[in-house]
Image: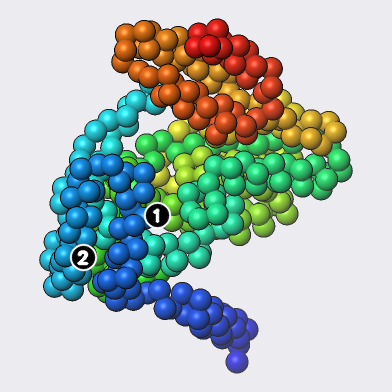
Amino acid sequence: MTSVERRQGRYERRKAKREAKREIKIGGFDDFDRVTDLDNLNLAFKDAKKKVHWKESVQRYEMNRIANIIEAKRKLIAGENVQQGFIRFTLRERGKVRNIRGIQIAERVIQKCLCDQVLVPILSRPLIHDNGASLKGKGVMFSIKRLIVHLCRYYRQNGFSNEGYALIIDFKGYYDNIDHEILIAMLRDQIKDQRVMELTEKFIRVFGDGKALGLGSQVSQIAAIFYPNALDHFIKEKLNKKRKQKIKIVRYMDDMALISRDPKFLEYCLEEIIRFSDKLKIKINMKKTQIVSLKHGFIFLKGKYSLLENGKVLRLPCRDSPIRMKHKLKKFKTLLEAGKMSIKDIRNAYQSWRGAFMKRFQAYKKVSKIDALYDSLFS
């Protein structure tokens, strides 16, 4: 037996062992019957109505919940179309317009059942740990904590020095450039049940044009989280072996941060990432992609992070966030006087910014100044 044959034999044995382990872990989830189970559909409705139970469409669905769930099961088993079109609206965030295509409650229940019972258990398993997208137990705070952990570890491994660099990468028009054919091929490698795959493919292709996924669809969300997984593994398993350099990676959807002591190596990594992203037809936003010093600080997930000489990580909000809140409070005052906004709505909006957003950062003085403005306007 030649050396090539021995290597091939070892590869086949490792592959068979991985497949057997995968079957034990998630084989039970790859089953269309989980999507058509009445208990699972009922549970999906209870989760889907949270925070939107006041809507008329949700209340109408709940009035005939049992009949609606049975009808959903019948359509799924018969292979009928369960899509009901989109509810289109736009959101403006920091001057950026986002076109949202929401879905009807009847379709949302089926999508949620499909995702919770099949797609999420299967597609979340191959994800790297530092992919902090919105899965159970993860989210923005998870990604921020992982970034801080990596910076502290880097400081110790680098001889207690804050000399180093971060490569910040941003994908351009991420949802709009996800290629359907590439995505579906990836999904077929993970999902073996043909009926599950056909249903998932319908929810993806409904957005048309051979590319793009829509905000507002849960199938789109898990697909978008999974889509760059090959890129994540390429960085951790291939680039980490090059030149014996160790890089640390954190990714949240279309934002990515890589940490290394060598800026030249990060330039090489960026070239390889661009080349790999071209295969996935993902575009890199070069205006927002940059290599910056750790001690000078870099922007990631609306915050600025700097590694100090003593090894601590300084967390500050982006400069424009407090400025925007000042403008909002003054606008809220005008709306309050015009009777177009209640003091309760203003208080909730402000506490959401102050508690949910600003608590991530070390910004006592900035928050105190905004508190003083709030008190002067609404006390």
Amino acid marked by disc 1? Ile
Count up the numbered dots: 2
Q: Is residue 351 visible?
A: yes
**Label 2 residue SS:** helix
**Label 1 residue SS:** helix
Crowding at mark 2 (Cα within 10 Å: few <14, some 14-19, many 20+): some
Frontmost of labels 2 and 1 is 2
Nearer-N-terminus badge (2/1): 2
| Image height of 20 relative to 241, above or below | below
Question: Where's residue 280, x and y in %?
Answer: 40, 51
| Image height of 15 relative to 326, above or below | below
Compare residues 100 and 341 and report the one nearer the observer. Answer: 341
Are the residues at dot 2 and dot 1 in contact (C-beta closer than 8 Å)? no
Q: CA distance from mark 2 to mark 1?
A: 28 Å
Residue 159 is marked as none
| Image height of 146 relative to 301, above or below | below
Rendered image coloring scheme = rainbow
Question: Where's residue 12, x and y in %?
Answer: 53, 83
Disc 1 designates what residue? 222
| Image height of 252 relative to 21, above or below | above
Q: Quadrant of residue 233?
A: bottom right
- In the picture, the quarter occupied by the N terminus is bottom right
Disc 2 designates what residue? 66
Question: Where's residue 287, x and y in %?
Answer: 48, 27
Compare residues 49 and 189 and report the one nearer the observer. Answer: 49
Residue drawn at (49%, 12%), measured in percent from left and top? 378
Q: Is residue 321 left or right of residue 224?
A: right
Residue drawn at (34%, 63%), measured in percent from left and top? 43
Residue drawn at (29%, 76%), measured in percent from left and top? 33
Residue drawn at (51%, 76%), measured in percent from left and top? 25
